[in-house]
Amino acid sequence: MTMKIPHPIPYQGSKRALAKYILPFFPLDIATLIEPFAGSAAISIAAAAHRKAEHFHLNDINSSLMALWQEITTHPEAIAAQYEVLWQEQQGNARAFYDRVRDEFNRTHRPDCLLYLLARCVKASVRYNANGDFNQSPDNRRLGRNPEQMRADILAVSKLLRNKTILTSVDYTEVLACATPEDLVYMDPPYQGVCTTGDPRYFSRVDFDTLMQELDKLNRRGVPFILSYDGRTGEKSYGQTLPEALGVSHLEIKTGRSTQATLLGRADMTYESVYLSRNLVEMLRVAPAEIIAFHADHQAALFDFEAMS
């Protein structure tokens, strides 16, 4: 029987669907699972639900998002009630109400306003303007997550993470500097294509060379890490290749048919790239060649996900 994993924060690019392919590569006895680019914290939530880690460190440079996580983990009933108030107040005038909440959030950064905006905005896709203001439009076809369903997920996630999670909003390099060989770092940074174009989906960019330097530091300190970074559609790859000197093992996870390719009458498949640090592969006692052979089609053939959960 498949476990239902709660997710109160809808977020485009969330690794919720990929968690079942990533968690089997977690080593045993993790002191702390660290997510320097937390976003919706999909991997940490899944890890907590499957008891893959006992302690967590969630960080995101977006301080408003981390303030929302603070409310979810420590005051779940309150944030759920505040969300319901906003959801009910939109009835009959949803479009204009959304604009008012968006303006209120940009003035005050209230966590309940952000949760409402994430639940209502187009494709759960955050957008910011040059001033750092939330400027995504609403999805006028729906009113957002039902308050009862939202409350259930908020309470469930709070139960999973409360009293065992550190929440911060600092540059990711500060978080990585604190990681130890007993921890596991999972990173899902903004991908290279959006960093070079100033894509408004991301609150902050991540420089490729700096990230590579940080990965090298983790290697030198013996800190195991998993990195989700770019991928390919059909034969078209995105982003620079990671330096061979890092010694990472690369696997691809099939995420489905490309929407753009479908519109053009093609059947190109999209693959997410996931990289495992060399010390993590050593901890798993699996040959790098076997890691590279891993593929989503195999349904985690190297590991029995359900058995390990």
Image: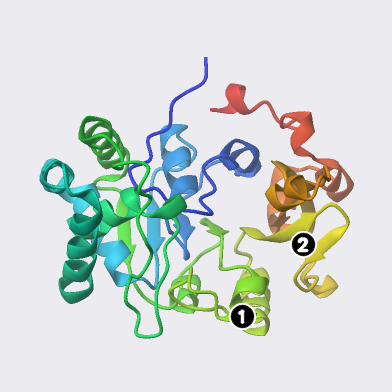
The residue tagged with tag 2: helix, strand or loop?
loop
Q: Is residue 288 above or below residue 135?
A: above
**Which residue is at the front of the view, 242 or 88?**
88
Q: Position of residue 282 (x, y in %)?
A: 74, 51
Residue 61, image quadrant? bottom left
Query: What is the C-alpha distance between the residues marked 2 and 1?
Result: 27 Å
Could you say which is closer to the camera, residue 272 or residue 60? 272
Q: In front of the other: label 2 or label 1?
A: 1
In-front residue for pair 282/229: 229
Position of 294 relative to 100 (above/below): above
Q: What residue lies at 53% left-to-right and 28% top-to-bottom?
A: 309
Residue 163 in sight in this render: yes
The number of callouts visible is 2
Q: Residue at x 88, y 56 (%)?
A: 235
Find residue 222 and report its horizontal and vertical position in percent.
63, 65
Front one among 62 and 91: 91
Point out the tag, 2 or 1, that comes first from the N-terminus. 1
Residue 172, given in percent of the width and then of the height, sits at 47, 74
Q: Which residue is mark 1?
A: 197
Residue for point 37% across, 43% down? 141
Q: What is the number of the mark on residue 248?
A: 2
Amino acid marked by disc 2: Val
Please indicate whether residue 212 sits to the left or right of residue 71 in the image. right
Visible residue check, residue 32: no
Cβ atoms under marks 2 and 1 closer than 8 Å = no
The residue drawn where x is 12% and y is 48% is 82
Q: Secondary structure at mark 1?
A: helix
Q: Is residue 111 left or right of residue 199?
A: left
26 sits to left or right of 271: left
Q: Amino acid at mark 1?
A: Thr
